[in-house]
Amino acid sequence: MTPSTRRSLLGLSLLTGLAVAGICWYLFVSRRPAPRDIDKVGGTILVYEIDSGADAPHSSKLEALPSALQKRLDPDGLHSITARLVDKARVEVRIPHLGEHHDEEIEYAKILIGGAGSLEFRVLANKHDDDEAILAAKRYFRNAADSWEEFLKAVRERYPGRSDRQPHPQGPRRRPPVSPYQVQTE
């Protein structure tokens, strides 16, 4: 291979590498939205005061609260929503103006902030200690089922001809909930 051919191949491979790097930069770096600053684009600041009653959380839990709120409101970090601890009793949530549905987004954020994580409580009973309570619960549910059957029988008698309809195999059809970040068309 002659020196001029080597230089030509080296130049061509360098040019190809630059082209690939430029395409990657365009696709992955330049198209990412710039973080929105609430001071420049406007927005809403929600301030929540933490109840300092007898069940006040420990200070280490308070320090983790802003990051938990931020993960709940903006899990992927694309909307530039920030939360910070203002003092020992207040949390500030800054939501920049994100578009024409800003009011709906604020209401959605309030719902997410106000909604606690789901807790499930189960009563653990055994026949030795709680036999009377178990029997009472069984009687209650048996009576409820019987009264429901009576109700259905009365409805079928009052509205004949409607009982031949078969229910949908997957249950009633419901529309999925619409996020305020989605455009709703009707």
Image: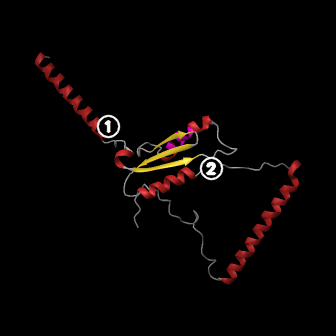
Q: Which residue is mark 1?
A: 29
Residue 2 can be seen, yes or no: no
Which residue does the image show at 64% across and 44% down from the upper left?
Answer: 52
- Asked if residue 87 is positioned above or below residue 125 in the image, the reply reads above
Q: Residue 153 lies in what quarter of the image?
A: bottom right
Q: Position of residue 84 (x, y in %)?
A: 50, 40
Residue type marked 1: Val
Q: Are marks 1 and 2 in contact (CB under 8 Å)?
A: no
Q: Which residue is mark 2?
A: 118
Q: Position of residue 128 (x, y in %)?
A: 88, 48
Residue type marked 2: Ser
Q: Is residue 110 left or right of residue 102?
A: right
The one of 114 and 120 positioned closer to us in this rendering: 114
Q: Quadrant of the N terminus?
A: top left
The one of 40 and 105 positioned closer to us in this rendering: 40
Residue 107 can be seen, yes or no: yes
User: What segment carries the magenta color?
Assistant: 64-70
Q: Is residue 113 left or right of residue 120?
A: left
Q: Is residue 144 left or right of residue 2?
A: right
Which residue does the image show at 75% across and 67% down from the upper left?
Answer: 145
- The number of numbered discs placed on residues in the rendered structure image is 2
Q: Is residue 67 left or right of residue 183?
A: right
Residue 67 shown in magenta: yes
The one of 176 and 154 positioned closer to us in this rendering: 176
Q: Quadrant of the C terminus?
A: bottom left
